[in-house]
Image: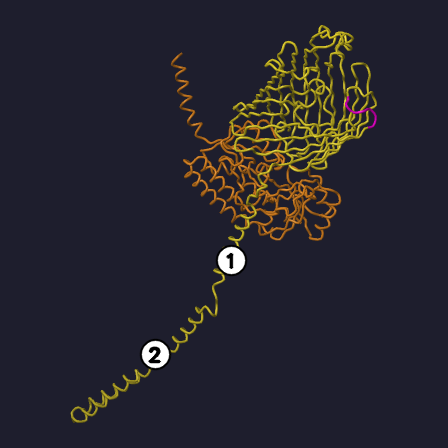
Chain colours: A orange, B yellow
Amino acid sequence: MFRNIVFLFALLFTAFPCLAAQIKVIASIPDLADIAREIGGERITVESLASGVEDTHAVPVLPKHVSKLARADALIELGLEMEHAWLPALVDASNNPKIKPGARGDIIASNGFVPREVPTIVSRKEGEQHLQGNPHINLDPSAGRLMAKNIAIGFSEIDPAGKESYDTNLSRYLAKLDAKESEWKAAAVKLNGVTFVSYHPHWIYWADYFGMKHIGTLEPKPGIPPSGSHLNELIALMKQQNCKLVIREPQYSEKVPNEVAVKTGGTVVKLAIMVGGTPEAKTWIEMIDSNLKKMIEAVGKP
Amino acid sequence: MRELQAGVLVLGLAISISLRAGEDMGAQFRILQEQFERLSTKVDSQQKTIEDQKRKIDEQQKLITNVTTPRSMPSSPAAELLRRIEKAEDQSAHAIKIASRKKPNDSNMSIGAAVDTAFRYFDGDRGDAERPAGNDFSVRGAELVFYADVDKFFKTYLVLNAVPDPEDNDEAIPALEEAAIYTTSLSHVQVKGGRFFVPFGRLSPIHEHDLPFVTRPRSLENYVGGESGGDGVQVQALIPIDHFLQITAGVFNKVGSEFPFDNPVPTRRNGAELTYMLKALTSFNIGDAHSFEWGATSVQVPDHLIRRNLNNMEFTYRWHPTGTDLRERLVWGTEVMRNEKRTRFLSNPDEVELGNDSVFKRRSFTGWGGYSYLEYFYNKHWSFGPRVDIFQPVVPEEAFATKRTYDQTYSLFATYTFSEFSRLRAEVSRHEFSNGSSANEFYLQWTVFWGAHTHSFDQR
C-alpha cells in the first residue's frame, strides 16, 4: 500500500513539470487564440473567452471567464479599446497580477498598428466611440503579420527559453501569410472598386486592402441601432452609387439588412467578424478565405 | 597614322632607288612595288575605319556624360520616393510621440456622474415609504463617482450621492456613500477596506440607479436596509481551480441599516457587536448559452443581547442565445432570506419616563422573505419583466401585530434604453401589506450617466 502511494506521488511529481512547462494563455477572441496556437505550438495552451458569434464589443461577462483568467500566465487582447466594455471587469475580478494592464503577461496584439477613424470630435452623441480609432484590425488581411509578431514578442518575454521556437514558428506562419496574401490579392481583383455597406464599421481595413469602397453603415453611429431616417438616407446613397452589397455580421438580426437589400436590389452576405463566426471560419486564415469567397460570389451575382 | 604612311612611302622610295641601281633586281623591284601599293591601300582603309570608330566613341562618350551629369537629372525616382517615405515616417513617429505624451492631468482620477429622476404615483397611505403619497416628482439621487489607480498595488474609488430629504423641502445634500481602497497585486485575493457596499446577496450591493427595476425589493429594504453599505474590511478570494468559486469574508461596523434599531452610538464597541459576513458564490454553464450562479451569504452580529442573524440563498440564471441577434437575452434572479434579530423593545411605553430600565425587554424576531424576477431583453432598446416580492416584516411592533403574516408586492417593469448612457423605465406595483391594507404604485424613471462609466464584475 505504502509503495503504491509513493509510486503515485512520484508519478504526480514527474508529471507536474511537464504540465507546468506549458504556458496558459487566454485570448479575448478566437482569432488571437488561433494565431497564438500557430506561434506558441506545444509550449502553450490557449483558450478564447469569446466563441466567435458574439459582438466583439459586448461579450457576455461570465464567471467561467474569471476562473480562466485567474489561472492565466498571459492574456492576449486585440486592444484599441475593442474589448473595453467587458474585458477590464473580468481582469479586475480575476485578481491575477500577471495579466493586469501593463504587466508582462498582458499582450496587446495591435501594438504598432496605425488605426483609421480616430475621432476628431470626442462626444457621447457620436455613439459608442473608440478614442484610439477603429479597432477591427482582425478583419484586415495585412494585419495578420503584426498580430503574429506581437504575440511572438509577448511569448518570448514571458518564456525566454522558448524564443527560438517562437521565432521559428513566426517565420513559418509569416511565410504562410505571404503565400495566402498573394492568393487573396489575385482572387480579389473582381472586388476592386466595388461599393458596399455593413451593419457596423467592421470592414474599413478590409475595404482598403482589397480596393473596395465602404460607403456607410446601417447604424447611424457606432453602437446605435438603425433608425428609419438614417436607413432612407443610406438607401438613397446606395442607389446613387449603384451599391448592391450589404454585409450582415452574425451578431445582428437579418431583418434590417434584408430590408435594405430589397429596397436597393442588392444582396446580403453574412460574413464572420471573428473566427468561429461562421462554420467555415475555423482559423484566422480560413476566416479571411471564406469571407473573401462569399464576397466574390455575392459580387458575381447578377 | 599619317607619319606611318609617310614613313612607308619614304622606305618604298629608297628601296626602289636602290633596286634601280642594280639591273638584276628590276623584276623583284616591280613585285615589291606592287606589294607596297596593296599594303598602302590597306593602310588607308584601316585608317578610315579607325577614324570612324574614334568618331563613334566620341559620340557615345558625349551621351554617357549627358546621362550621368546631375545638372540634367537630379536623381532616380526610386531614390526620391525612398527619401520622402523616410521623411514621412520620421514626421509621423514624431507626431505620435507628441500625441501620446503624458500630460499632468493624465494622473487625475476618472470622474463619472449619474442622475436618477422619477415621477411616482402612490394611492395608499404613506406607510413605510419615505416619499409622500399621491403624485410626486423627485430627484432620487445625483451621484458623483471618482476612481483611480493609487499606485502599483492599490485602486480606489469614491462615491458621493445627494439624496433629497422630503422632511427638509427636498434639500439634497451630498453624502459619502462609498470610499474604498482595494488591492490589485495579490494573486487570487483582493483585500478591500473603507466604506463600500458589502456583497450581501445579489441586488443589495448594486446602486439604486443600476438596478434592473425602479424600486429595490421591499424585502431587501426591510431585512438589509436597502443598499448594503458598511464600514469595514473584506477579503475576497477566487479559489484557483477550474470551477468558479469565490469566497468573501469581512467584518464591519454594520451592514445596511443601522443595527440595532434603536441603539445609540456605542461609547465602546466590543468584538461581538461588530457585523461579520461570509459569502460563497459559484456557477456552472450548460453550453455557451446558459449559465447558472448560486450563492449563500451570512451576516452575523454575535452579541447575545443584540444578535443579528441574516442569511440568504441567491440564484441567477442567464440565457445568452448564440448565432442570432445577441442583444436578445434573459435573466432570472431569485433571492431567499431568513432574518433573525434580537433587540430591545419597550414593553410598556408609559413607564419610560419613570426611568425604569426594566421596561426594555429583549426578544428575537424571525422572518422569511425574498423576491424573484425575470428580465427579458427583446433587443438593444427594450427589456421587460415581472417581479414578485414577499417578506415577513421584522419590526417589533409589526411582528406583534401581524403574527407572521406577509407583505407582498407584485410588479411589472419595462425599460427603454436609448443608449448605454440613458434610459427610461416604467414600473407598476400592487402592494398587499401585512396589516391588511393594499396600495397601487406607479413609477416613471429617467436615468442618465455621463463621464467615465464602468461596471464591475459584481454588477453584471
Report which residue position mark 2 lands on: B50
- Magenta stretch encompasses residue A159: no
Indicate the position of residue B270 as horizontal and vertical percent values.
Answer: 60, 14
Q: Main secondary structure of the magenta part?
A: loop
Packing grade of label 2 (10 A; few <14, some 14-19, many >=20) is few
Q: Which residues are magenta?
A: B129-135
Where, quadrant-wise, is the N terminus of chain B in this rendering? bottom left
- Magenta stretch encompasses residue B130: yes
Looking at the rendered structure, the secondary structure element under dot 2 is helix
Q: Is residue B116 visible?
A: yes
Packing grade of label 1 (10 A; few <14, some 14-19, many >=20) is few
The residues bearing labels 1 and 2 have C-alpha atoms spaced at a distance of 49 Å
Looking at the rendered structure, the secondary structure element under dot 1 is helix
Indicate the position of residue B328 as horizontal and vertical percent values.
Answer: 68, 32
Residue at screen point 63% across, 9% down: B304
Report which residue position mark 1 lands on: B84
* Nearer-the-camera pick, A196 or B191: B191
Residue contact between numbered discs 1 and 2, judged by CB atoms under 8 Å: no
